[in-house]
Structure formats: structure tokens, C-alpha cells
Image: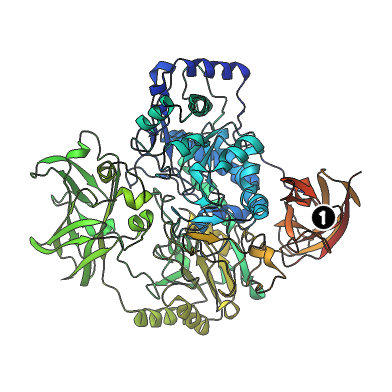
Amino acid sequence: MTRQPTTDAPSTSSTPSATDEAELARRLGALTLEQKVRLLTGADFWSLHPEPAVGLRRLVVSDGPAGVRGELWDERSPSANVPSPTALAATWDEPLVERLGGLLANEARGKGVDVLLAPTVNLHRTPYGGRHFECFSEDPLLTARIGVAYVQGVQGGGVAATVKHFVGNDSETQRMTLDARIGERALRELYLAPFERIVGEGRVWAVMAAYNGVNGHPMTESPLLRQVLHDDWDFDGLVMSDWFAARTTEPSARAALDLVMPGPIGPWGDALVAAVRKGKVEEALVDDKVLRLLRLAARVGALSDIPTTATPLHHDAASVATRLRETAAAGFVLARNEDAQLPLDRAALSRVAVLGPNAAAARTLGGGSATVFPPYTVSPLGGIRAALGDDVEVTHGVGVTPQTRVPAAALAHLRHPDGSGEGVEVSFLGEDGTLLGSERRSGGAYTWMGSYGPGVPIGEVARVEVRTVIRATDAGRYAVGGSGIGRFRMSVAGAEVFDVRLQLPPGADLVEGLMTPPQRLHTVDLAAGEETEVVLTHDILTHDTVTHDAVTHDVDSSDDALGDAVTMFQLNLQPPRGSDDEEIERAVALAREADVAVVVVGTTEEVESEGFDRDSLALPGRQDELVRRVAEANPRTVVVVNSGAPVLLPWSEEVAAVLLAWFPGQEFGNALADVLLGVAEPGGRLPTGWPVSEEGLPATEPVDGVLAYDEGLFIGYRGDGRTGWQPPRYAFGHGLGYTTWDYVSIDAPGELPSGADLTVEVRVRNSGTRHGKEVVQVYAGRPGGAVERPLRWLAGFAVVEAAPGEEVVATVTVAARAFEHWDTEGGGWAVELGTFTLEAGPSSATLPLAVDIAVGNS
């Protein structure tokens, strides 16, 4: 049987009634031009202006894809950290993703958030893409269906989803200025396709315009906004800019951009009022933008006397943990499992070695705007120890340290100067040293956007001072310092150890500078238990934090306003540690003595984050060497790959099992233990292929500001059969479970009128010994056709479950669009009449069943 959607997802109607539309028009008519234009630029970083004259309250927006951050970006406002979008797409499970969307809506409402800045549906054009982890898939259909489920879950809870980044923001290098040159067919059939379905079927309430340009036009000024969103798709929602992406007054106002974010600075405001007064921008365009904003406000319940129709669901801490644990396990992809090494037999275990740099401090989310601060994280080491209990000895070794940067100081090493417990004292000082305000904090990472907190006058803060006492847990050499942009001074035990100005490298992206800023360090030798006072001072000066030019490159707005708006830096601390050589030898010794070795490897924030693209797909540092050495010592080696995007696995055939875990959220360790011990099945299938080498992959580096999508339609698995295409190590759609499946038969109509959807029935049998889940995939092809196409493309899929020995039928709907191509001459969708082939199987590379379909005019 095909799995049916569950009923525990929220629901809402997103289409305003005629009465509501008339009321919105009435309220619009009550506003002056100045009032209308004021609404079209944000009030600050995360909110929109209220307007009492029409009953509009303040609206709050929030990142993002890995959890709802809210208006604070630090540990004082914890957020449920959900699995990364690649992990969600790896589930291929729309009901599960819709339920997760409902959880996010509940989180948003708890933080006073009306609009969630997610999902990101740019495609995995290349694994080098820095935000690959924040996007769903290399395939537009899988991206679209998971995206629709995500949006329906969020909006069913009365919170607007924002599908982004429209369009062509598929890499990070020069993303604010590059012009993506995308052929018309590739644009329509690949890059616009997820947006189209999410606008049409998902009825998303907001769209975010990207930083980059496409085919000669910056997206905030692009004719695509009106031609595609308004004219082709009849989108009635709001289009907002990405943060600081709007750079002009008249061109962006004449385009179908409705909201400039953030505020209060920006290219509209008084300049737009003047442009309307001079007749350079029609007031009717302004009215349409305001009407869309009011419609959004009505949908989220921000307009008085217009109630939202949403039915949000309540999620307490226990239900959140259960949902995140289930979702993480459902996205784990078991890529290799030689001789059925997994699941482990708990009764046969006496000692387990949990090794690797990500074992005790795993990555649960990627860097950049998707970052949240979870209330807790369960590491692989912690989850495995909790699951095995005291009867099994679990040993641990870090193996290698791939990071080259010193991390933010951990709370375990920080003490308040007054001796009152763990933490730091943060003081906001005026130019003359006057104390303007203070905070007690419990971490080493600090971000303020638009405010330093209640009662602290932002324009008067000249310095931020962090004061703490560092306590040595072990004897040895500690590295302590600061990272950020601007002037930093540090004293240790009352003596100044540095006074430096840290600067971004030339051409660095804003987020790259904020996520991986320059560091200055000082080393100090401490005995175990010894304490020493540390004071880190950061000067807040114009251009020191972030200059406006670094954000937009060509805006004339006030640098001072942005300099005050964003302050972001860290107090860094690295405890003593052994060399890689020493740690590898220790890990090998632990592996040799264990029944099984679990090695957790992965990327770091230095190589995988928003703000920059990757220049290598290799695991950083000496992790490959660690895996090989451990596998030599213990043939029962299971490698868990903790990365948001593909990495090279040159040792994959040398280990017993490979489990791809993505960035799986705060319940990582518990979900991992469930899968390793067979409590849960690894439910994931690859949403993108994992390459065997870096040869032939699309580039991310623009040439003279232009990034040419020369591969056209043939990204990912669609490149099969093309010159230079390399078969991947693990194919799109691949994933093993804890049972086996036989593909028995495929049944579909022999003929199909063009423009009609198709129902395909695929019969499969669970030929193993455990209950299991299978993702049945159907691919279309057009052998011998005159229109250039990939050999095959995903046309539909369905998730089925069955008991051992049971046969079930997967009912797969193949939409009419699967047989269509974009006609560049006619400017619309067309069908090349003739015979198409449908193939069914467990991945794009394994398709044992096939049937021909005659697609015609009848």
C-alpha cells in the first residue's frame, strides 16, 4: 500500500474572500502616499512598520530553514533545531515534512514571529554551493514536492512561509553582484519549477527576491518578478528583497518588488515618494505593493477585525523532541552496509569505540542565516552512551582536529567575575567610558542587530566589553582571543596582550565575514583548576562592524546606520589538545579493542557555510587518514558522515557501513543510536548524487561577473550519458534500509492524451525479514526524440511500507508536466508527441521495471 498523509498537520485556507479583499482595498484607500511608502521598507532588521490608521500591528519576520530564530541571535532565545533541508528532502516523505512545518509554525508563534524566511528551494546545481545544505535537492520535482509540504505545514499554523531565493541563487561566490546566465529551457524546466509548484499548489504567501542577477537584470529589478510571478502564475502574495539586496529606487519600484528589507534604511522611503510625485513611478504600483502587504498581514492575523483561519497545533518540549528524533532518522541515508553489519546486535556488544572530530561535538546545522541556538544538542557520543547504558563500555577519541580556527569559548570554561557561576559579563560603554547597559551571558558568541537591548541607546555605544574568568579544566596551553571585524583589545590577568584592528579580506562576502571573521589569539599556560581574568573589548566605530558597501557594493545610503545595526564577534578559547598524530594513534588503539568502531567525520564551519562556496569536496584535515587507520584496526567500522552536502569518500569500499547523517538537528545522537541499534530504520534516500571525484562538476566562480550555466538541463543525474559526465559514487535516489525489496511489476495506460496526468502502479515485495519502508521512484525518458533532453528525469515517487513477505502497490501520480518541455519559440509548454518510457526502481541508477506510454493529441 502507498502511505497516506496523516491527519495531525494544521490546515488553513490561503485564498482571501471577496469581502476581505474589499476591506483591504478600503483600508488601502485610507492611507496617504507617505504612509503607504513607509510600509514598504522594514522598520528594522526583523520587523515591519505598524500602521494604526488601518489596524495593522507590527509584523515580525525570522530566519529560517533550520529553526525559528526570532529577533535575537544568541543563546538567550533558544530555538528547536530541526534537521537541515537536505535531511528533510532525503526523507522523500511529504506528510512527515508537513508535520515538521506545523512544529515550526508553533515555534514561530511562541516567539511572536509572523513570517518565516524559508524554505530555500534553489537547486543543488553543484556540490560546491555554499548553501547546498540549506536547499532540498538537485531535482526540481523532489524540491517542489518537499517544498509544498513544508509550506503547507507552516502556513497551516497561521505563519507565512517565504519561498526563496527567486531565482538562480545557486552558489555564493559574488552572489550579490553576479549575473547568472541561464538558458530559457533550463530556467523554466529546472530553476523556476519548484517556485512554480509552491506558488500554485502550495499557495505560498511570500517570495524572496535574490541578491544575484539573472540574464542581465538584478533580481530585485528583474522583469521575471512580474512576468513570471504575476502574469504567468497569478501570484497574489508579497515579494520581499533579500537583506540589503534592493539597490535602486525607480527600477526596483517599477518591478514587482513589494518590500525592501531590512529597514529603516534603503533605496525607497522619501526617494520613492519623490519618484511618484514626479510621475516616474505610478502610484498604482505602490498601491498594489501595499495591498499585497495588507493581504499578507490579514493571512497571519495582523490586521484588526480580520481573523486568521489557521488552526495551529500545540507542541510541548517532549513532542518536539520526539518529532525531531523521528525526522532525523527518517533522513539518514544508509549508503553502504556490507554483510548487513547494521543494525548492531546490542546483546553482542561489550565495548564500542565512538571516534572522530564530530563524535562529541557534532554539527547539527550549517553556518549563516540558518543558524539557531538550540536548547540542547545530543551528540553521537551522548546518544550512543545513553542508548547502551552502563552494560556496554563506550570509549571515545577525537582522532583529528580538522578546524584551523579556534571556536567560541565554551561555557564550561567561563566564570562570572563576581564568582556567581558560569558565564560572562557584557558591558556597553559610551565614548567616555560611561556604562550604558550590561548583560550576563552564557556563551562566547555575540550578535546584536539593530538593538543592544532595552534602555541601551544604540547610537551612543562606542565599545562592548566582555569580562570573564577562564578556568582551566586540564593543565596545558590555552589559546584565548577574539574574532570579528574592527578594533579588539584583550587583557589577561590585568595585562594587555594585544590591541589590533581585524579586517575582512578584499572581496569577502558580508556573511563570510560574519561567520568566519579574522581572529587574534594569545596563548597562556594554566595548571588544572587555575583561573585567570580575561577582558575582551571591541570598539564600535563606523565601518568597523560592517560597511554598507560590503553589503550592496553600490548603495549611497548611510554607512553609519548599518554600522550601528550589526555587531557580531566572539570570545574564542581552545583548551589543550594532543597533536593529530597522537590522537590518531589513540583512536586506532581504542578501535582495536572494541567490538565495533563508529567514526563520525564531517565538514566544519570553515568549509561549509553561507557566504562562500567550497573549493574542495574532500573532508577537511586528516579525516580520511583517520577512517582508513581505524578500518585497518577493526573491520567492523561504521562511518557516519556529518555534512550538509556531498563530500568525497575515497575509503568507502574499505569500511563495513557508511551512514550519511547530514546536519540532523538537536536530536542527532538519539536518532543515530536508534538507527545503529535497529530501533528505527534509516529512512533516507539521496536527494542529490554524491560524486566519486571532483571531475566535471559545474563551477561557482563567475568570469567578469557572469556565471554561465553552461551545463543547461544536465545537472546532477540528468547529465548521465553526456560527454564528461562521471557516474557518482552514490546515485540520486539511492539508500538502503534494513530489509530488501523486489520490484515485481509496473502498470500504466498504454496511451495518454497530452495534458493529462497519469497514474502508474508499481508492485513491490518486501523480500527481507523486517518491516520496512521503500521509496518507489518513477523516471520518464523520450528515447529517440528530436527535442534535447536528459536520458531520464524524475517523474513521480511514492513511499510504501510492508511487512516481511508482503506485496504492496505504490500508486505514483505522474503529472502532465513530466512529459512537457519549454518551447523557446512559442514561449510556453509543449509536448513532443510520441512514445515516452517510464522506468521504476529504487534509484536513478537502478530501474528494473519499464513501460512505454504513447503521448498524443487524442
Q: Is residue 641 above or below residue 166?
A: below
Q: Residue at x 72, y 47 (%)?
A: 3
Q: Is residue 760 above or below residue 586?
A: above
**Residue 683 picture location, percent across and down:** 63, 57
How was the colour assigned to the protein in this rendering?
A: rainbow
* 128 sits to left or right of 579: right
**Residue 8 picture location, percent across and down:** 61, 37
Q: Residue at x 58, y 53 (%)?
A: 136
* 494 sits to left or right of 48: left
Q: Amino acid at mark 1?
A: Val
**Residue 594 picture location, percent across and down:** 48, 77
* 834 sits to left or right of 39: right
Q: Is residue 637 visible?
A: yes
Q: Is residue 197 above or below residue 748?
A: above
The answer to which quarter of the image holds residue 511 is: bottom left
Q: Residue at x 56, y 32 (%)?
A: 237
The answer to which quarter of the image holds residue 777 is: bottom right
Give the total of numbered labels: 1
**Residue 831 picture location, percent across and down:** 81, 50
Q: Foreground residue, 22 or 675?
A: 22
Q: Is residue 315 visible?
A: no
| Label 1: how many Cα within 10 Å (few below 14, some 14–19, many 20+) | many
Secondary structure category for the residue under label 1: strand
Q: Quadrant of the C terminus?
A: top right
Q: Residue furthest bottom?
A: 632
Q: Which residue is mark 1?
A: 762
